[in-house]
Image: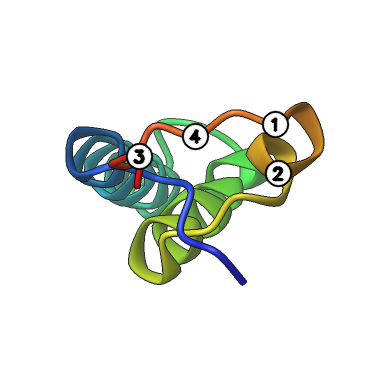
Amino acid sequence: MQVNIGSLDRLLRIVAGLALIGLSLFGVIGWWGWLGLILVVTGFIRFCPGYWLLKINTGKRR
């Protein structure tokens, strides 16, 4: 897997994912808030399959 997520994108994914999970835990939003796990995982591994399919790269170019 090649890194295709940059630093800012990574930070935003992790924060948004944790926010969705937190809102779901407190019952503010439904079960779909657990989809925030996808954002958290892709933020930590720095690879997004959707970006790969669309040939998007927000990371540093070599």
* Kind of residue at badge 4: Asn
Q: Are marks 4 and 3 in contact (CB under 8 Å)?
A: yes
Q: Mark 1 points at which residue?
A: 55
* Kind of residue at badge 3: Arg
Query: Distance of mark 2 from mark 1, alpha carbons?
Result: 5 Å
Q: Do the residues labelled 1 and 4 touch (CB within 8 Å)?
A: yes
Q: What element carries label 1?
A: loop
Q: Do the residues labelled 2 and 1 touch (CB within 8 Å)?
A: yes
Of all residues, the one furthest to the right in this rendering is 53
Query: Distance of mark 3 from mark 1, alpha carbons?
Result: 13 Å
Nearer to us: label 3 or label 1: 3
Q: Nearer the viewer, residue 6 or 31?
A: 6
Q: Mark 2 points at which residue?
A: 52
Q: In this view, does 53 lie to the left or right of 29?
A: right
Q: In this view, does 46 lie above or below 8?
A: below
The picture places residue 28, in percent across and down from the top left corner, at 40, 32
Residue shown at the point (64%, 36%) measured from the top left:
51
Q: In this view, does 43 lie above or below 58?
A: below
* Kind of residue at badge 1: Lys
Q: In which quarter of the image is the N terminus?
A: bottom right
